[in-house]
Amino acid sequence: MGAFDDIEAKGSSSPTRFSMLGRGIGEARRKFFLFALLAFFLLLTFVAFRRQDKIKDIVDQSFHRSNATAAVSKPDLKPDSKSDPKSDPKSDSKLQSEQSKSRLKPETSSSYGQGPVLATANGDRYLAKSSLNDIHNTSLGFEKVYVLNVPGRSDKLDMMKLTSSLTDFNFDIIEGINGKDVPKKALSGVWKDSPGVNGIIGCWRGHMNFAATVVKNRHATALIMEDDADWDISFKNQLELIALGSQTLLDNPKGITPHSPYGEGWDLIWLGHCASQPTPGDNRRFLMKNDPTVTPYTHRTNYGGIPDMSPYDNSTRIMYFTMGSTCTYSYALSYHGAQKILKWLSMDIYSGPVDFGLHDMCEKKERGFKCIGVFPQIIADHKPAGAGNKDTDIGDGGSNIREKGFSYNIVHSTRMNVDVLIDGKMDKVQAQWPEDAPNPPLKGPVITDFKNEELPPRPEGTW
């Protein structure tokens, strides 16, 4: 090959070389562009986090100023800025009442809500606007709402989903347990074989799982309902009164918004039961008078001791410190209340129905378990139309056929008014016992009062 041919041959390869060089430059440009884009996003992220930190600092400074004001005006409060266990995994969780002091906020005139008010000689007690908003949210002012439901009972679960939607709250499920599936080594005591014992064990374990869930998730408060529970259509308005009553009984500072609308310092609030007794010698009573949702005397169905209601008229509901209740249709637990239940009813020796165990917790003062009761109850159980054996998952429930369903102790039953509530026809809502409704009808708001005085002897033959 000649010189010219050699040059021509070399020249013929130059397009390929230039093409390779072009691809290399293009690849470098793409890499540079991606790197620049990544650097830009990192810069934006840094700026955003710095902005969030600045906002957080402003909020924290404002919060600490508010707490400083509270410390001056309320010397008995000792707010601090420590985080709670949920935000600080290294925290060893002091008592909830101590934890929440850092979250107590002074109220101003703008924080006053439109809920119930308790007039006292030392000034009015009322719920803050934030507390009212919490009660009317989808967890009813608790951190979480749970429903205890045995797998397979889709009929009960469907009704709970429907009725909770009609009264605007949500829930998560605690799965019910079949007692025969609980290993004997996992039981907290010696359970004798007897008819129905597996149902009792399963019920006990289901409620222990609720307490364990509260502890595991560090819920400050949580409410549980059994899956046949029913309540009045004005449920959230009732809970406003319950919150005011709880704060009153606990003597929480006025003018200070507690972390929970239901106050600070309680372990259990028993909202749904079939019997309840005040603590002997404790005469503190929070009264809710002129209440159209109070069950008439002749329709109050209970299976044990109840408060002496003879001093009150037929439209008064009361709250009190209770030595215990029977049946677990619904109750609320605080975080430390749940801890105590696990300790005494699961880790220690106990072998009996769970409601008896909770009753013991409330009654035995040495356990430091503070329980609040309400009577007449605001949550009760529903008996649907159809076969009686559908009623319970503990026993057989009977073989009768019920042509029409009903609910114990609930005046304007949500379940009994499902049809009209779905259509939004509030004017068509029916009371369960219209023939025994107050006559003339009650007018005006519910009137609250607080008494702490010795009660007269209970007349024989009275409720």
Image: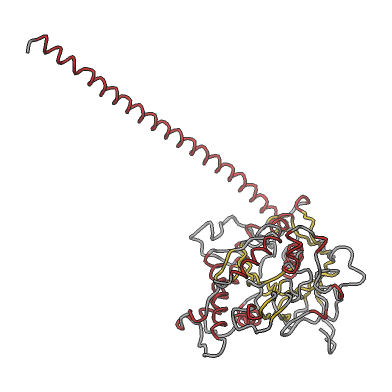
- Name the residue: 70% across, 70% down: 230
Up-down relation of residue 224 to residue 324 (above or below): above
Residue lying farthest to the left in this orientation: 1
Of 173 and 108, which appears nearest the observer?
173
Of 124 and 31, which appears nearest the observer?
31
Quarter of the C terminus within the rendering = bottom right
Of 382 and 78, which appears nearest the observer?
382
Up-down relation of residue 7 to residue 228 (above or below): above
Of 146 and 89, which appears nearest the observer?
146
Query: Residue 135 occupies which quadrant of the picture?
Result: bottom right
Left or right of residue 27, residue 83 in this image: right
- Name the residue: 56% across, 57% down: 82
Task: Residue 99 in the image: state x and y as whole percent.
Answer: 60, 62
Task: Residue 1 in the image: state x and y as whole percent.
Answer: 7, 13
Task: Residue 357 in the image: state x and y as whole percent.
Answer: 60, 81
Q: Is residue 176 visible?
A: yes
